[in-house]
């Protein structure tokens, strides 16, 4: 190994600078009293105060959080059922079919999910707004939960269930006292993943939302289309902090459960 | 007993599959054969393959190709260097963190950076090149897309490199191969799966993400995703929109078939 000028380190540093520079740029200018994203004048908290005083924005944040929590709760339930169903299907071919169908929404680009769900909701007459957004988020969160729970079920030793049955446990007991406790880490990971996907989603929501109901991403998009407003910068700094907390939280959950850390896949 | 309990688990899940997986795909397919008047027609498809739409498709593919290529050129060396660092998992985590931040916000940041009075133009000014129009060009679209997709390219390549048995590299060097030969004959072929996965992760979203083009490229670049969004939400021509969507699904299926590994996303990225 020859040690000359350490160009790999320089290259790596450059990549890191490029990756983080825009994010910090965004955050730094959220404190610019000049009101523009160039020429930093002086430090101010104005835009943060604006964000916290904007009731419309706070309602949107609330909407986003409610949608995220509700959709990930419901999809965790459906997803756990789905993972159990897939595990219990005996014929390999049926199992593979279910798995492929499960992965369709993970693989599909957001535009296609959004467009097809827009057709679906209009077709069956669901009003576009809270309900349609909630249903759409449940739709794309279920397969994520299934993917996170399935490995835990497969790791489980079947003798554990046999033992419980031999010892006289009813099927319900087996489910609630043996199976569910041993896949709890997977369920939490799935819930958390669904939560981050829901919070992060823009494109699907953009398609299926109607007048009067927006989530944070959609609001940011419509603000950003109008040009630069440092309120978005302040908002992104806050979102960045929340994301960081979520990522750290997820990191510890997944460390405990042994599952790896994934990342938000753009679709 | 066995079968009954199994069916119970299957009920809500099967309902989900039927309603949110099968029905939407069927409806999109159905709408692609539906004219503006509601009757059956092939005109969407003939229109798609004959007019400007075909040109649009080609240019969308070209941009996706460029984005994937640049992302790969930047990411492979990065992943290679990362695997050789001491705390590689920590460094990798730092690469991933930006990918957790909402894409919209990262794109928005470039509105400032590439703006007329932004730092890039300030730099160009001091270099004597003068202020350029960077925003709303295809350059800015490709640059921002590459920026956004780099982490998604690095991760699968890193995982592939990390699994590579280092003794193979040593053996190749011992047998007299140069660094470049070792890379070309040993390292790259053995990590091709990671490269494929990364290209898949970048190419398909490059075809379909519409907010980057809308925010950064103005009307300079129209991708398949932008066209779908346009037809569904602006011109309300769902038939044409569905046709493009079906085409995009078909393209996606072909790409996945070609790159072999059908598990994209989560399944691939679990080893961090």
Image (spheres, rainbow, N blue to C red):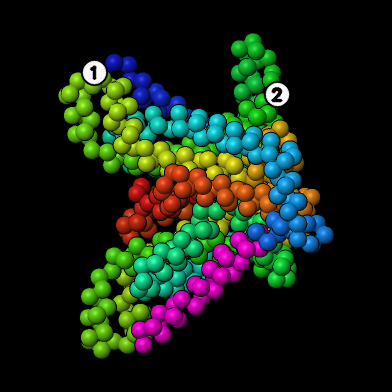
For the magenta stretch, what is the residue range? B1-28
Q: Position of residue B166 (x, y in %)?
A: 22, 34
Q: Tell me which corner region of the image, top left, top right, bottom left or bottom right, holds residue A237.
A: top right
Q: Position of residue B239 (x, y in %)?
A: 73, 55
Left or right of residue A119: residue A93? left
Q: Nearer the viewer, residue B250 or B177?
A: B250
Element under disc 2? loop
Q: Position of residue B262 (x, y in %)?
A: 43, 51
Residue at the far right in the pictured view = B37
Residue A220 is at least partly visible in this image: no
The stretch drawn in magenta includes residue B255: no
At 41% from the left edge and 48% from the top edge, which residue is drawn?
B261
Q: Which of the labelled discs sits on residue B133, or is there none?
A: 2
At 22% from the left edge and 86% from the top edge, which residue is drawn?
A166
Badge 1 crowding class, 10 Å Cα cut-off, few under 14, some 14 to 19, many 20 or more, is few
Q: Nearer the viewer, residue A86 or A18?
A: A86
Are discs 1 and 2 located on one and the same chain? Answer: no
Q: Is residue A71 above or below residue B129?
A: below
Element under disc 1? loop
Disc 1: which residue: A2
At 62% from the left edge and 24% from the top edge, which residue is drawn?
B119
Residue at the far top in the pictured view = B128
Per the picture, the main secondary structure of the magenta-coloured stretch is: helix
Distance from Cα at disc 1 to Cα at disc 2: 45 Å
């Amino acid at each position: 190994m020859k040690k000359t000028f350490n160009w790999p380190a320089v290259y790596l540093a450059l990549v890191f600078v490029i990756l983080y520079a825009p994010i910090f740029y965004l955050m730094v200018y959220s404190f610019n009293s000049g009101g523009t994203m160039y020429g930093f004048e002086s430090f101010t908290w104005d835009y943060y105060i604006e964000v916290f005083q904007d009731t419309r924005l706070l309602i949107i944040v609330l909407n986003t959080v409610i949608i995220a929590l509700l959709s990930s709760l419901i999809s965790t339930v459906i997803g756990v059922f789905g993972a159990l169903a897939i595990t219990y299907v005996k014929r390999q071919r049926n199992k593979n079919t279910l798995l492929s169908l499960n992965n369709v929404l993970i693989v599909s680009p957001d535009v296609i999910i959004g467009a097809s769900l827009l057709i679906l909701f209009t077709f069956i007459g669901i009003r576009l707004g809270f309900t349609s957004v909630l249903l759409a988020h449940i739709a794309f969160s279920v397969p994520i939960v299934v993917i996170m729970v399935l490995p835990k079920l497969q790791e489980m030793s079947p003798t554990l269930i046999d033992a419980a049955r031999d010892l006289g446990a009813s099927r319900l007991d087996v489910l609630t006292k043996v199976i569910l406790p041993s896949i709890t880490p997977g369920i939490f990971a799935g819930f958390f993943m669904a939560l981050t996907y829901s919070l992060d989603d823009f494109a699907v929501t953009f398609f299926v939302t109607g007048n009067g109901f927006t989530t944070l991403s959609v609001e940011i998009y419509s603000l950003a289309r109008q040009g630069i407003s440092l309120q978005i910068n302040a908002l992104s700094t806050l979102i960045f902090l929340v994301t960081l907390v979520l990522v750290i939280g997820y990191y510890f959950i997944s460390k405990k459960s042994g599952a790896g850390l994934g990342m938000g896949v753009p679709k | 007993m066995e079968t009954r309990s199994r069916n119970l688990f299957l009920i809500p899940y099967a309902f989900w599959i039927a309603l949110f997986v099968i029905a939407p795909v069927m409806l999109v397919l159905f709408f692609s054969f539906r004219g503006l008047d509601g009757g059956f027609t092939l005109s969407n498809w003939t229109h798609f393959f004959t007019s400007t739409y075909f040109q649009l498709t080609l240019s969308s593919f070209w941009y996706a190709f460029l984005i994937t290529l640049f992302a790969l050129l930047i990411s492979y060396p990065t992943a290679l260097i990362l695997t050789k660092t001491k705390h590689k998992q920590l460094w990798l985590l730092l690469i991933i963190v930006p990918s957790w931040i909402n894409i919209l916000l990262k794109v928005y940041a470039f509105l400032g950076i590439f703006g007329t009075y932004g730092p890039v133009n300030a730099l160009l000014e001091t270099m004597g090149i003068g202020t350029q129009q960077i925003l709303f060009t295809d350059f800015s679209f490709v640059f921002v897309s590459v920026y956004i997709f780099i982490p998604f390219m690095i991760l699968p390549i890193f995982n592939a490199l990390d699994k590579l048995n280092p003794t193979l590299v040593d053996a190749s060097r011992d047998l007299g191969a140069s660094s470049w030969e070792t890379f070309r004959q040993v390292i790259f072929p053995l990590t091709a799966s990671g490269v494929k996965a990364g290209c898949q992760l970048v190419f398909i979203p490059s075809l379909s993400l519409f907010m980057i083009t809308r925010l950064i490229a103005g009307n300079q670049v129209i991708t398949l995703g932008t066209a779908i969004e346009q037809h569904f939400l602006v011109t309300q021509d769902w038939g044409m929109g569905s046709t493009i969507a079906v085409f995009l699904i078909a393209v996606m299926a072909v790409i996945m078939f070609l790159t072999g590994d059908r598990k994209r996303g989560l399944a691939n990225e679990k080893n961090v």
